[in-house]
Amino acid sequence: MARTTIRIDDPVLRDLKLLQRREKKPLGQLASELLAEALGRRHSAARVSEPPFVWHSQPMGPTVDFGDKEAIQAIIDREDFPEFFK
């Protein structure tokens, strides 16, 4: 477990020490647990605010009659037809 020094406002530290005595836990452990809970809620809130992914699908039949050779050739001859298919 990493050691660090942080500045905590006096009222927050007072409440933390009261909670420490009530729960009989080391101050560092209690602070870690409370920070982990707060960070988890913040991450959850961020995920909830993202719009849900929605997949739209629909039947996509052919746009040309495959039995009509002239219609197929007309599509192939178009300027926007990809070169690698020719």
Image (cartoon, rainbow, N blue to C red):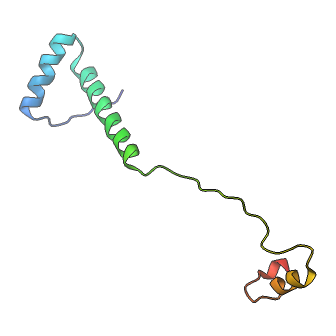
Q: Nearer the viewer, residue 4 or 58?
A: 58
| Quarter of the C terminus within the rendering | bottom right
Q: Where 11 sits versus 66, above or below?
A: above
Residue at the farthest left position: 10
Identity of the residue drawn at 10% across and 35% down: 9
Q: Position of residue 3 (x, y in %)?
A: 29, 30
Count of numbered labels shown in the rendering: 0
Question: In the figure, residue 77 lies in which quadrant?
Answer: bottom right
Identity of the residue drawn at 34% across and 30% down: 2
Question: In the figure, residue 24 lies in which quadrant?
Answer: top left
Q: Position of residue 18 (x, y in %)?
A: 12, 17
Q: Nearer the viewer, residue 69 or 81?
A: 69
Q: Nearer the viewer, residue 22 or 52?
A: 52
Q: Where 4 sits versus 68, above or below?
A: above
Viewed as shown, does residue 16 lie left or right of 28?
A: left
| Quarter of the N terminus within the rendering | top left
Q: Nearer the viewer, residue 34 or 73?
A: 73
Identity of the residue drawn at 29% across and 27% down: 32
Viewed as shown, does residue 85 lie left or right of 33?
A: right
Identity of the residue drawn at 35% across and 34% down: 40
